[in-house]
Image (spheres, helix red, strand yellow):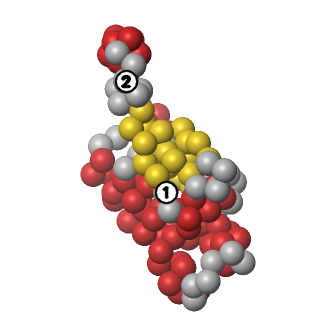
């Protein structure tokens, strides 16, 4: 499926009802901050060269406090509304600000292929069968 049709899928969906699912590997530091680990390449040949040269196999993306909390709440079962409800106890922002921030954040993660949404995966699988 092209990136353009992915954009249409998410625009036609109510993101508050969607269930985010992680796609990227990650690590959590002792302060609870998340760093996403994005492979530099999928090529086994290039990976072996990078290992021999002692180069990192990953590009790292450090998430801020709220981003880290959102990432750690993503369990593949809870929808975006539920994630926001869980965050409200820990974040000192008004509800509308928090909703907007989380929706923008999840949209960015989706467009950069760090997450997907369960419902869009199912719709894509059905579309591929036809």
Q: Is residue 71 left or right of residue 58?
A: right
Q: Where does residue 34 sit, x and y in percent of width and height? A: 56, 51
**Of the numbered discs in the image, which one, if any, rests on residue 63?**
1
Q: Going from the N terminus, do you reach mark 2 or mark 1 first?
A: 2
- Gap between marks 2 and 1 measured at Cα: 22 Å
Question: Closest to the observer: 13 or 25?
Answer: 25
The correct choice, above or below, for 76 with respect to 11 in the image is above
Q: Which numbered disc, 2 or 1, marks the residue closer to the eye?
A: 2
How crowded pointer 2 is (Cα within 10 Å; few <14, some 14-19, many 20+) is rated as few
| Image position of 129 with respect to 82: above or below | above
In the image, residue 88 sits, relative to residue 55, either above or below, namely below
Residue 41 visible in the snapshot: yes
Residue 105 in the image: x percent, y percent? 45, 65
Q: Which residue is drawn at 61% across and 83% down?
A: 92
- Residue at 47% x, 39% y is 37
* Residue 130 visible, this orientation: no
**Nearer to me, 129 or 113:** 113
């Amino acid at each position: 499926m092209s990136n353009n049709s992915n954009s249409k899928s998410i625009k036609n969906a109510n993101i508050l009802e969607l269930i985010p699912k992680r796609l990227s590997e990650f690590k959590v530091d002792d302060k609870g901050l998340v760093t996403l680990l994005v492979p530099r390449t999928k090529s086994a040949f290039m990976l072996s060269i990078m290992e021999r040269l002692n180069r990192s196999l990953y590009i790292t993306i450090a998430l801020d406090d709220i981003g880290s909390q959102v990432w750690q709440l993503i369990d593949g079962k809870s929808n975006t509304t539920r994630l926001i409800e869980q965050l409200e106890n820990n974040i000192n922002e008004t509800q509308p600000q928090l909703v907007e921030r989380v929706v923008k954040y999840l949209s960015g993660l989706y467009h950069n292929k760090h997450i997907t949404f369960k419902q869009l995966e199912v719709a894509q699988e059905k579309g591929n069968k036809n």
